[in-house]
Image: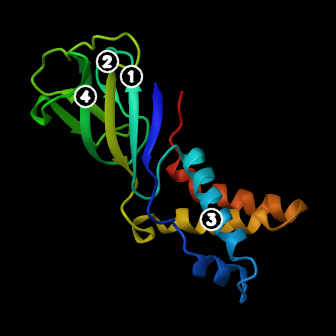
Amino acid sequence: MKLELVMPPAAEPVTLAEVKDYLKIDHTNEDSLLLGLIRSGRQACETFVDRRLVRQVWRCFRNDWGAGPVYLPFSPVLSVEEVAVFMEGNYQPLAPENFVIDLCSFRPRLVHSNGQAWPMPEIPVAGIRITFSAGYGDSWNEVPADIRQGLLHWIAACLETGEEALGEKRRAEEFWRPYRRVKL
């Protein structure tokens, strides 16, 4: 499966003001560094928990439908914008009434709604394209508070050294662990 980021998050899960307040920084000399740490902290958290935090649009390409439901790579899924199959020389969108989005399962998935088989693509590689939005919502305010608290610890760890840095990273992961989606 190939993944492509179509639209990155419009906001980060913690604000620069929150980070500066947490770290007790009252000047602007390190703002660009802190903004970079906020972005990399979000990415580290998203990798750790295998979820997306603030709404972002992704496109995944599949070679075939596989057996059973079609699992989406990230959660939480907010919406599926398009399911398209390569036919007649181009990607043709499937009508939304032909599939159901299961957002209640631990792993979000698509199921063909009328029990029929999915249409097969005309090309053997990347013939199925699914565009979807993932994240807890559009703003930092919709991200769970403990994930946000973990981000503050992660950012603090990046500014520390030695044992203090390790302790802060462990605290961040303790906040994130309940949200972790483990793959077997």
Q: Earlier in the sequence, mark 4 or mark 1?
A: 1
Q: How far apart are the two marked residues, 4 and 1, measured between alpha carbons?
A: 11 Å
Q: Which residue is mark 1?
A: 62
Instruction: Give neighbour class at mark 3: few <14, some 14-19, many 20+ (Cα, 10 Å).
Output: many
Image vertical order of residue 100 relative to residue 158, above or below? above
x and y percent of residue 104 in the render? 28, 43
Q: Quadrant of residue 35?
A: bottom right
Of the residues shown, which amino acid type is indicated by label 2? Trp
Give yes or no for contact between labels 4 and 3 (Cβ–Cβ under 8 Å): no
Q: Secondary structure at mark 1?
A: strand
Q: Which residue is mark 4?
A: 84
Residue at coordinates 58% horizontally, 57% vertically from top-left? Answer: 42
Does 125 sit above or below residue 145? above
Circle nearer the N terminus (4, 3): 3
On the rendered structure, is 92 left or right of 12? left
Protein image colouring: rainbow
Whether pointer 2 and pointer 1 mark residues with C-beta atoms closer than 8 Å, the reply is: yes
Nearer the observer: mark 4 or 3; the answer is 4
Residue 15 versus residue 84 in the image, above or below: below
- Seen at 53% across and 52% down, the residue is 178
Mark nearest the camera among 2 and 4 is 4
Q: Amino acid at mark 4?
A: Ala
Q: Amino acid at mark 3?
A: Ile
Residue 62, percent from left and from top: 39, 22
Q: Which mark is residue 38?
A: 3
Asked whether 15 or 33 is in front, the reply is 33
